[in-house]
Amino acid sequence: MDKPQNHPFGELLAAYSAGSLPLSQALCISAHLEHCDSCARQLQHLNRVGTELMQQLTPSKASDELKNRLLERLDSLEAETPRHESARVDSSIPRCLRQFVDSSYGGLRWKRISADIHSVELCRDSNGAKVELLKIKPGGSATTHTHLGDEYTVILEGSFSDESGLYRKGDFVVKDKNDKHTPVATRDSECICLAVTEGPIQFTGPISRLLNPLIRRSYA
Ligand SMILES: [Zn+2]
């Protein structure tokens, strides 16, 4: 398998290691890590450094109230049922996404966005970010757009290109509001991506005045 060529930048990986990323972004990093040995090794290193730093801190004495609250929290965590994951799930689907997929990408309830694109929303983050899968047909194109917030994409199947280059399976791509781009799937296969958008995308083509209010409403 080809190695991913586009990786999360260091600060993102460090924030993932520290557990301080929003869940939607952490999901993208997890999906990338399942394809990328290089980032997985870097993460192990960051985790080790984090553990050493924690060990150097001088512990202060915890109050009885804090201890009781922690014990209650641990009890409630143990009582929570394990997350759903079907035994029949396709092994090509990243482990971090199997809670959303019963068997295969084909079995999901895809919604038609355009002649070339279908999407299925997986969840919303508490910060409002939308987590979805996008499917672009072979050779299909997304309308040229910019973003009102950051957009994180991990390619799960196939590949696409835009003005900045070609992205293949496992690649991690971040676009912000200064990036205007037109993703086009390569002709050999359909492209499936995990996409996290922190705000609505803004179409810039001639039909933008019709589409943009509809897209903004989906974030309301
Ligand atoms: Zn990587």
Image (cartoon, helix red, strand yellow):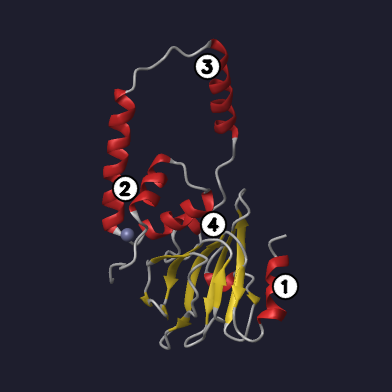
Q: CA separation, marks 3 and 4?
A: 37 Å
- Label 1 belongs to which residue? 214
Residue 63 point in image, percent of width and height: 52, 12
Picture layout, residue 212 above or below residue 57:
below
N-term-proximal mark, 4 vs 1:
4
Tell me, for residue 67, which label it has, or none: 3
Q: Please, what secondary structure does the residue beneath circle 4 have?
A: loop
- Label 2 belongs to which residue? 43
- Image quadrant for the C terminus? bottom right
N-term-proximal mark, 3 vs 2:
2
N-term-proximal mark, 2 vs 4:
2
Q: Amino acid at mark 2?
A: Leu
Q: CA separation, marks 3 and 2?
A: 30 Å
Residue 166 point in image, percent of width and height: 36, 78
Instruction: Say which of 152 and 169 sits in front.
Output: 152
Label 2 CA crowd tier, 10 Å (few <14, some 14–19, many 20+):
some
Picture layout, residue 181 above or below residue 39:
below
N-term-proximal mark, 3 vs 4:
3
Q: Tell me whether the residue at label 4 lies in contact with that at label 1, contact meaning CB atoms closer than 8 angstroms.
A: no
Q: Amino acid at mark 1?
A: Leu
Q: Please, what secondary structure does the residue beneath circle 1 have?
A: helix
Label 4 CA crowd tier, 10 Å (few <14, some 14–19, many 20+):
few
Tell me, for residue 86, which label it has, or none: 4
Q: CA separation, marks 3 and 1?
A: 49 Å
